[in-house]
Amino acid sequence: MKANARHHGKVTVVDLSGKITIGEGDIKLRQAVNALLDEGRKNIILNLGGVSYMDSAGIGELVACYKRAREKGVSLKLLNPNGKVQDLLILTKLQEIFDIYRDEREALASF
Amino acid sequence: MIEDATNHRRPEPGRRESPPGVDRNVKLRLESRIGYVDLVHEMAEGLARRMGFAKSMALNIGLAVREAVINAIKHGNGMDASKEIEVSFEQDDGLFRVRVRDQGPGFDWAHTSNPLERENIFRSSGRGIFFMKHFVDRVEFQRRKGKGTEVVLEKKFEPSGRAGRGGEVIKRRKG
């Protein structure tokens, strides 16, 4: 799994690609989000467009990131979950929890 | 990896040998290391594809097996690398069956919480068995006296394009 952060004014978009699974992807996701929280970033978009699938550990880490962000007063939103990732968010009812966007401009403007 | 054993059934005299991936049973014995989860997932998905499952369904099978292996390593064997897990893949009359065995003291699979309940939705764990049950037709846990736990996952074969659950069992023609 790869995570690349880019900044658009007050918003940071993290482009994720690969799979978010136990032992590697989940750890990289945690590190990427923790780094942004440590930097004091207040608005984060996780771009899931390049993520092929996640397992229970990856979904669990996504929830953990959301909780950590919320505890610090940081807004964390999701962009463009596709295929299996979208299926998993629906299956776990997490699509009701996360703010999810299809269009990046719309997501950027939502903060 | 400790052992990798592949067994081909001998074709009966006069019968053509089945194509690779069909009539094949594979058994793996692995140390309890998370690093092997991807290997088992890819093997499950690959065998399902060769059996004729649609790509999306093969991924579902791979994900279910992945969760069973994670459970066996984490909750069954308690991440103790000296304990083994055993994974067997079987094709049986239109059915793809995967058995995952651990050597641990067992865990209480009967009382797992529902991850869809409001109080559990923010939990960062507890979705593995839920995924297994969603992605295959049957999940059965069996405690083996003094030998750990066996999880059996079964998925009926469905032709490409029918990735839903259940459905008619259609035998693949040979030759």
Image (tube, coloured by chain):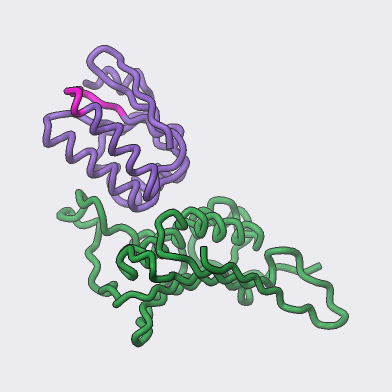
Chain colours: A purple, B green
Q: Is residue A103 inside the magenta stretch?
A: no
Q: Which quarter of the figure is the N terminus of chain A placed in? A: top left
- Image vertical order of residue B110 relative to residue A4, above or below: below
Q: Quadrant of residue B93?
A: bottom right
Quadrant where the C terminus of chain A is found in the figure: top left
> Who's the residue at 34% across and 23% down the image?
A5
Residue drawn at (75%, 68%) of the image: B173
Residue occupying the far top of the picture:
A9
Magenta-colored span: A37-45
Q: Is residue A52 above or below residue B1?
A: above
| Left or right: B16, with A60 as reference point | right
In this view of the protein, can residue A80 be seen by the observer? Answer: no
Measured as percent of width and height from the top left, residue A31 is found at 29, 35
The answer to which quarter of the image holds residue B149 is bottom left
Magenta-drawn stretch contains A42: yes
Task: Please state the horizontal and vertical placement of residue A23, each as a whole percent of the image.
Answer: 37, 49
**Residue drawn at 29 percent across, 72 percent down:** B109
Disc tally is 0
Task: Give A89 or B146, whichever is nearer the viewer.
Answer: B146
Using the rendered image of the protein, determine whether residue A40 is visible from the camera's viewpoint.
Answer: yes
* Residue at the bottom extreme, as displayed: B145
Q: Is B27 drawn above or below residue B52 in the view shown? A: below
Where residue A10 appears, as percent x and y from the top left, is 22, 15
What residue appears at the point 85 percent right and 82 percent down from the top-left corner? B13
Q: Quick check: A95 left or right of B44?
A: left
Please, which residue is most extreme toward the front here? Answer: B82
In the picture provided, is B52 more to the left or to the right than B175?
Answer: left
